[in-house]
Amino acid sequence: MHAQWLDAFDDFRDQLVQNTRDLVRIPSTNTPPTGAEKACQDHIAALLRDASLEVDYYFLTEVEGLEAHPSYWPGRDYGRRPNVNGVIRGQGGGRSLLLTGHIDTVPLASMDRWQHDPFGAEVEAGRLYGLGAGDMKGGVAIALTVAQAIQRLGIKLEGDLLVESAVDEEFGGVNGTLAGRLRGHNADAAVILEPTNLEVYPAARGARIINLEMTNAAQVVGGGGRYPGLRAPALPAPTAQGVRRPTPAARHRARPLQSLREPPCLCGSPRSRPGSGATRSRLPRPAACCSRSTGR
Ligand SMILES: [Zn+2]
């Protein structure tokens, strides 16, 4: 990329903030099996069309082979949950790049701990506050703003640039992103614009969801503190093993991939307020953020 273009991108800083604020102000909470992403996706599709991208706005129910795919997470309702993909066609001779993110957020668990309107997108002392501002409407806004900037600056690309906003990522969902791949919106490389404290993670650990059915165990409770005073029993060994530190051999294999070397931190970011959302991020985090590492 020419230096002149990098300088020109600086002029889109305000646009990036505005795009993020606009997305935060449109609720898109994920409440399995349904989700309220449609209004946000309509907004994104309109912006991409305004920027003269080729837009594919499609419902997951239209994607051939999705439900039969081995990674498909069953039991979801996609009647009103569209994915959006926009393309800037390259002129040829270059490799393609996909910028992707999910537009759903966790539900609003409680208003008690919010000091700002979760859908107000207020900016205070250089920080933007709102539900999903970091995870990951800010990331989706980056993809949008890059596309808008490229088009407005008249930059001609050699390869295709794809911009994707997927539904249903929270709660372990993979279906929105999987739908994009099966729909054929694929590229030579992809950048997933999740928040990583501006660290580049060349790989991610993935996740495993385990459904446990427990019988004859008095005082078995679900999460969320719905039954104060009751405690969940200790998890059986296979489950505990799933979050054990990696073996030395595994650490060696992961050496070039720093993000895989340590077990995931399950704590919230120090900037997130506990209880402000229904789940906490499972992204690997730098050691400094983690209560395990800091001994708090
Ligand atoms: Zn996320």
Image: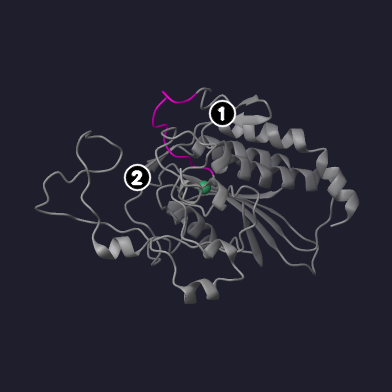
State the image coordinates of residue 95 (x, y, percent, origin top left). 73, 67
Q: Quadrant of the N terminus?
A: bottom right
Residue reaching furthest to the left = 216
- Single out the residue that lies furthest toward the right: 4
Name the residue nearer the viewer: 257 or 107.
Answer: 257
Q: Per the image, is 106 magenta?
A: yes
Question: Marks 2 and 1, Cα distance to the nearest angstrom?
Answer: 23 Å
Return the x and y of residue 24 as percentages of the image width and height.
57, 32
Mark 2: few/some/many CA within 10 Å (<14, 14-19, 20+)? few
Mark seen at residue 107: none
Dot 1 beta carbon under 8 Å from ligand 1: no
**Is the stretch drawn in magenta largely helix, strand or loop?**
loop
Looking at the image, which residue is at 81% across and 44% down?
Answer: 9
Q: In this view, does 266 lie above or below 72?
A: above
Dot 1 amino acid type: Arg
x 52%, y 23%: residue: 117
Q: Give the range drawn in magenta.
A: 103-114
Residue 26 visible in the picture: yes
Of label 2 and label 1, which has the lower sequence position?
Answer: 1
Q: In this view, does 254 lie above or below 199?
A: below
Q: Where is residue 53 in the image (x, y as percent from the top left)?
A: 70, 48
Name the residue located 56 percent from the left edge and 28 percent from the top edge. Answer: 25
Residue 25, label in figure: 1
Q: Between 263 and 43, which is closer to the camera in this rendering?
A: 263
Q: Could you say which disc has been placed on residue 33 in the image? A: 2
Tell me: residue 34, above or below residue 189. above
280, 55: nearer the viewer? 280
- Disc 2 within 8 angstroms of ligand 1 (CB): no
